[in-house]
């Protein structure tokens, strides 16, 4: 006891107590929130919707409106569904960094939990496409690569390029590369049609066909470079450049060397 | 004489008594070729053509040009069970199941790209040095013919595998054919054997690609080279080099060794590229069906400028008497290339008409000494480059985060603005270079060494240039511009006054240049 009172007035006592208090609160919060996750009751869902609403009011409402009704610069979010929010926020496209031609992929601003809360809130406004579950996304089991390739060339290659490398659209807009995109986001993009992309409803491309598409895209991603260096898989432009620079350029260099006069 | 020499001599004698070409061979082997790196560009063309023939023969052994439908059942998993043409399936088999097939395909395609690049480089060398002047005008036209054949042959080769990219190219080809007024649709139906894609086109262009055009190539190349042989090679000016001689190495042994070695270097570079860099990965494109297309579909580089012209042309169409005239295709894809190729073919005659120079020329021009021609060349290159950039507009847009519309508008304006600008700038640059040459002859090289004179004045020491260099800088001739009087001696207006006026104005523009250093100038400077 005597020892405690001796250090009571120590210089480091106050900061030490502060850190201790913060740690205690943090731990308590973590344990509490962990229990929320473990039991998704209707109460918890309501809590997530409430949390999502708070995040929405802070981060999204300035463009999308206080009631998600949309505005001059942003669309209404009523009825877009959880899948759309999960795609836009999860890939970092929303919130937009600047109002340029197109929202681009970047590190997400909100973590998984906040994104889920936002999705729950937007989904609560009106029914819309839901986030596909892992059991739905088993493309390895349910997909067919060759069929996926055929579907890809019919529906996707005109914008995303034959190998999913992305391509140009009008006025600076573009179809992004599909390499390295998580299966969940590909699926969500198909059912929600973000930005310039059309919606591929389950009637036009069935869920099974969507999985085939994902399987083909993943196969293209892991496709070994059979012919050597690919130079971006963007076709004859880089091939022509290489033919001039490494082909003819080197040959001219050698011709200069061959015709140099002996000294 | 050793027995070995005797035996060889006997054998040679045996052959000569039956062929009788010893005299010709001896004369030919003593033929002299001048040495300059740019004279080897034509060799690159010839060697890559040989490589194309060899690798193409290999591919033709396995390729099936048929457009009949087959279900793919080969080793490439992502296409298994897909319906495709036999042409595409056999190209997949060449790539994956024939030993060395993929390497051969890549050698064939890389060689084609380098072949066309070398032709263009060779053409530019001949143009900028004035090697096309009399007596070589016919050979120039043969060269243009080879370039044109190369375009067609390349397009056919690109189309044969029947992958998605091939088909897209053919679709554009059919559109261009249909844009020919009146007969276009008939010609298209005739060539494709029905509505696009038809069933007959691939087998037909296969025959052209492997038989007719290579045959034409061989014939024209032979004449092209024989003419160089017969007319002798041009040479750059230098001491001891005249319009009547050729200074260089005889064919045997030095030139032959160099040229022979160079073939293997060309082969080596092409084989190396083919081994490390993928070209036209048809298995990724998938088979062609008219309903599909890939973003960023591009032709091979030598067709890119035509594609770019088509991409920048505004949507103009006329409907008259039940016919549609598609100016948007006809102007960029038929009229402009027509003007470009015809203009190129006739350029030697146009230039000699402007200068009035009808003499033979075996000594080459230094590009700066003919500013007008050099500027015209750079202007043409600028035109093609702007079109080429627009041809890749979608690729540039995606990779550099640009707007495809802005690139198109940039090209639409630049195609008219930049070439004339390039002409003016190049002409000024040539004149500046002439001025620099003049300074070099008169004052010598700036050594960077400053010397203080007894009077206190600082001067930079100039080192005189070598006699050889001085000769090169002053040996070119400067022909005066043509002049025509509008009236004859009796004051009567001459016929063709407008033509003569145009001609004398062009001639005046052509003859612009700084007076070269004369002997009097040099004497005067020595007095200083």
Image (cartoon, coloured by chain):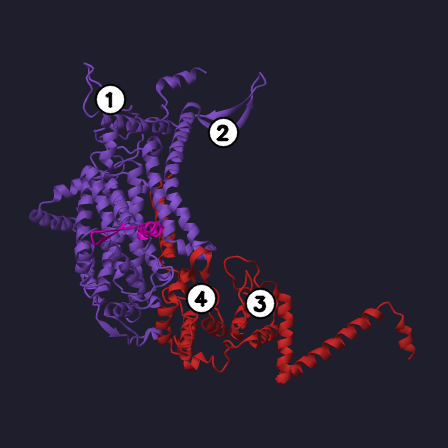
Chain colours: A red, B purple
Q: Chain of mark 4?
A: A
Q: Chain of mark 2?
A: B
Element carrying mark 4: loop
- Residue at the far right: name it: A2
User: For the magenta stretch, what is the residue range?
Assistant: B302-326
Element carrying mark 1: loop
**Looking at the rendered structure, which numbered label has been put on residue A108?**
3
Residue linked to disc 2: B447
Q: CA distance from mark 4 to mark 3?
A: 21 Å
Q: Is residue B520 magenta?
A: no
Element carrying mark 3: loop
- Number of other residues with Cα within 10 Å of mark 2, as a class: few under 14, some 14 to 19, many 20 or more: few
Q: CA distance from mark 4 to mark 1?
A: 68 Å
| Closer to viewer: mark 4 or mark 1 | 4
Marks 2 & 3 on one chain: no
Residue pictured at 42% horizontal, 29% vertical: B436
Q: Are marks 2 and 4 in contact (CB under 8 Å)?
A: no
**Viewer-nearest residue: B142 or B106:** B142
Residue linked to disc 1: B484
Marks 1 & 2 on one chain: yes
Above or below, B296 against B331 in this view is below
Q: Chain of mark 3?
A: A
| Closer to viewer: mark 4 or mark 3 | 4
């Amino acid at each position: 006891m005597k020892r405690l009172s001796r250090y009571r007035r120590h210089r480091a006592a106050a900061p030490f107590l502060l850190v201790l208090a913060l740690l205690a609160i943090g731990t308590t919060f973590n344990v509490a929130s962990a229990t929320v996750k473990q039991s998704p009751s209707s109460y918890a869902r309501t809590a997530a919707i409430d949390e999502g609403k708070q995040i929405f009011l802070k981060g999204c409402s300035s463009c999308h409106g206080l009631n998600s009704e949309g505005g001059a610069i942003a669309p209404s979010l009523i009825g877009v569904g959880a899948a759309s929010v999960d795609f836009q926020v999860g890939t970092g496209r929303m919130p937009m960094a600047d109002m340029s031609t197109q929202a681009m992929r970047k590190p997400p601003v909100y973590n998984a939990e906040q994104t889920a809360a936002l999705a729950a809130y937007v989904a609560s406004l009106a029914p819309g496409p839901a986030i596909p579950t892992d059991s739905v996304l088993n493309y390895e089991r349910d997909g067919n690569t060759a069929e996926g390739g055929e579907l890809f060339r019919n529906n996707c290659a005109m914008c995303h390029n034959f190998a999913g490398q992305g391509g140009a659209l009008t006025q600076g807009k573009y179809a992004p590369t599909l390499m390295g995109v998580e299966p969940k986001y590909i699926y969500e993009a198909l059912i929600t049609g973000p930005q310039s992309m059309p919606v591929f409803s389950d009637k036009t491309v069935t869920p099974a066909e969507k999985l085939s598409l994902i399987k083909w895209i993943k196969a293209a991603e892991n496709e070994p470079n059979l012919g050597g260096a690919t130079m971006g898989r963007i076709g004859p432009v880089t091939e022509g450049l290489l033919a001039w620079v490494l082909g003819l350029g080197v040959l001219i260099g050698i011709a200069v060397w061959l015709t140099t006069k002996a000294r | 004489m050793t027995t070995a020499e005797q035996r060889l001599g006997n054998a040679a004698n045996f052959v000569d008594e039956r062929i009788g070409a010893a005299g010709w061979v001896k004369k030919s082997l003593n033929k002299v070729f001048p040495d300059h790196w740019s004279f080897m560009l034509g060799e690159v063309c010839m060697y890559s053509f040989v490589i194309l023939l060899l690798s193409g023969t290999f591919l033709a052994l396995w390729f099936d040009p048929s457009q009949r439908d087959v279900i793919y059942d080969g080793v490439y998993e992502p296409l298994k069970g897909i319906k495709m043409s036999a042409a595409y399936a056999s190209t997949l088999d060449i790539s994956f199941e024939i030993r060395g097939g993929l390497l051969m395909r890549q050698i064939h395609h890389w060689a084609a790209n380098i072949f066309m690049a070398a032709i263009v480089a060779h053409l530019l060398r001949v143009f900028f040095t004035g090697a096309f002047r009399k007596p070589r005008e016919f050979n120039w036209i043969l060269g243009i013919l080879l370039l044109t054949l190369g375009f067609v042959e390349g397009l056919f080769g690109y189309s044969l595998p029947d992958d998605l990219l091939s088909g897209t190219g053919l679709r554009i080809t059919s559109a261009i054919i249909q844009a020919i007024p009146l007969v276009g649709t008939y010609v298209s139906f005739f060539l494709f054997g029905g509505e696009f894609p038809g069933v007959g086109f691939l087998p037909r262009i296969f025959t052209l690609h492997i038989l007719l055009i290579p045959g034409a190539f061989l014939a024209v190349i032979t004449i092209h080279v024989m003419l160089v042989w017969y007319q002798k090679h041009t040479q750059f000016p230098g001491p001891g080099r005249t319009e009547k001689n050729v200074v260089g190495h005889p064919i045997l042994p030095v030139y032959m060794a160099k040229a022979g070695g160079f073939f293997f270097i060309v082969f080596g570079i092409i084989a190396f590229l083919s081994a490390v860099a993928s070209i036209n990965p048809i298995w990724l494109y998938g088979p062609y069906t008219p309903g599909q297309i890939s973003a960023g579909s591009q032709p091979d580089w030598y067709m890119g400028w035509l594609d770019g012209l088509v991409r920048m042309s505004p949507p103009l169409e006329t409907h008259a008497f039940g016919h549609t005239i598609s100016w948007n295709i006809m102007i960029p894809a038929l009229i402009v290339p027509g003007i470009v190729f015809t203009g190129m073919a006739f350029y030697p005659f146009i230039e000699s008409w402007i200068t009035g120079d009808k003499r033979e020329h075996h000594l080459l021009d230094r590009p700066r000494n003919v500013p007008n021609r050099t500027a015209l060349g750079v202007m043409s290159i600028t035109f093609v480059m702007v079109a080429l950039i627009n041809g890749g507009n979608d690729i540039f847009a995606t990779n550099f985060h640009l707007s495809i519309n802005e690139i198109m508008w940039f090209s639409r304006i630049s195609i008219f603005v930049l070439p004339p600008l390039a002409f003016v700038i190049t002409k000024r640059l040539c004149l500046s270079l002439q001025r620099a040459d003049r300074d070099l002859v008169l004052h010598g090289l700036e050594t960077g060494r400053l010397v203080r004179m007894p009077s206190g004045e600082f001067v930079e020491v100039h080192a005189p240039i070598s006699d050889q260099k001085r000769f090169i800088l002053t040996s070119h001739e400067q022909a005066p511009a043509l002049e025509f009087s509008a009236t004859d001696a009796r004051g009567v207006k001459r016929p063709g006054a407008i033509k003569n006026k145009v001609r004398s104005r062009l001639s005046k523009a052509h003859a612009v240049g700084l007076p070269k250093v004369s002997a009097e100038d040099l004497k005067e400077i020595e007095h200083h």
